[in-house]
Image: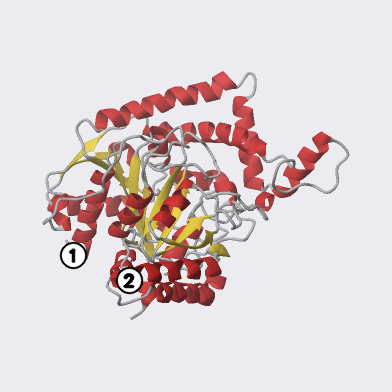
Amino acid sequence: MDIVKLSALEIREKILNKELSATQVVKAHLDRIDEIDKDINAFISINKEEALKAAEQVDEKIKNGEDLGSLAGIPIALKDNIVTRGTKTTCGSKMLEDFMSPYDARVVEMIKSQDGIIIGKTNMDEFAMGSSNERSYFGPTKNPVNTKLVPGGSSGGSAAAVKANEVPLALGTDTGGSIRQPAAYCDLVGIKPSYGLVSRYGVVPLANTLDAVGVFGKNVTDAALMLSAIAGYDEKDSTSYENSIDLVFEKGLEPIEYIKGMKIGIPKEIYLDEVDKRLKDHMDKVIKIFESLGASVEEISLPHLKYGLATYHVIATAEISSNMARFDGLRYGHRAKEYSSLDELYTNSRTEAFGDEVKRRILMGTYYLSMGHGRDYYEKALKMRTLIIDDFNKAFKDYDIILTPTSPILPFELGKLKDEPLTKDLTGIFTAPVNLAGLCAMSIPCGYIDGLPVGLQIIGDRFKENNIIKAGLGFEGGMKNGI
């Protein structure tokens, strides 16, 4: 039995049935990381001793006949902007190279309460600013599908860790597509939940009104298992959703039956010049699969979708400018050794510790918020955000889910677009509007084009995660059955 190739659900079942011990599972995954991570660079830090200790505690619970949580014995990786007590949280930056958090993020507490085992912290674009995972202070992560390719960003380390069988589950964060795009590029399932469903307490913010903590899994069932473990109200997060959502499905149904009767919308605006022409033909095949499974698929219009990316960048960079002000060389993080005044301390610390992409986005956001430009850019972006939300609200009155490609382009080679940030930014053209509207969405594998993985984005209304999960399960079942 090759333990690292098992799904999260299979691992849990084998541990509960005493076919495997949690210690065996953790050791197998630690060995896998030792074997291949030098070639992938998915991890920034590994919690070896803590993980083995947690595994022993799970095994002791089983021995004593105690109840176990839903993540019992499953190794889990965390994106390195989710704080963990006693382990470095670097955000992929020199600024926080040695930062140790005094507390656990809420999602970390929930994982531990469900007997999940946190095995390490994953590589990421610096402060989650990037779409290829080439902007980390600790070097780029490589795509396990093909190590010449980027894994997508900014949660590329978490995606690569799951794809390389270093862990069966991982958490990432998604501000404009940073879970869904890596999931697409690494041939995985990635879920960005509705804004407020998962607590952001203890997550280093990028853009507070857009950020969401989400999950990576090898399949839809695994991803749903992980999401159900971390979803829930948190009084420490003022944006947390107070009502509970049970991610359950009708018993007795085959997965492909979930899609029967669904009404699905395909925005006509997705067929843009920027979209790889090969993806257009591929989408036609995807639509036929949903129709063959009993769904009603119709073309719809989201007239303001084309303005989503520009709107996202104005709002996101404005919030970035504000959020990054806390890294000043005084309270925590990197502090310059040479300075002669307070202003020089600020300047030297930030100049030395921030990478080019972080500086670029801070400058953009500061410009958008500056006197004389706030109304020209930021206020107009907020108005456009409202129009985008209205478009989705109208669509979801008549449709259960909306489908788009996850990314308008296929995975590209490392270094190819490193110095072309505007071109890379286009990868969020279909994902960013979802964050602006606070919706839930999933990227699910839907085949390959010329050896490159393709992701399908399934979008659901706010707090309608069950719709996207059911659609994902049905589509996954249809793909496996060759429909």
Q: As rendered, which of 179 and 132 lies closer to the eye?
A: 179
Mark number for residue 23?
none
**Left or right of residue 338, residue 77 in this image:** left
Q: As rendered, which of 97 and 269 lies closer to the eye?
A: 97
Few, some or many residues within 10 Å of mark 2 (<14, 14–19, 20+): many
Q: Secondary structure at mark 1?
A: loop
Q: What residue is pinned by disc 1?
A: 482
Between the C-alphas of marks 1 and 2, the distance is 32 Å
Q: Secondary structure at mark 2?
A: helix
Q: What residue is pinned by disc 2?
A: 15
Q: Is residue 174 visible?
A: yes
Three-letter amino acid code of the residue under disc 2:
Ile
Q: Residue at x 36, y 40 (%)?
A: 194
Q: Position of residue 156 (x, y in %)?
A: 49, 57
Q: Position of residue 402 (x, y in %)?
A: 27, 41
Q: Residue at x 19, y 50 (%)?
A: 249
Three-letter amino acid code of the residue under disc 1:
Gly
Q: Is residue 278 above or below residue 106?
A: below
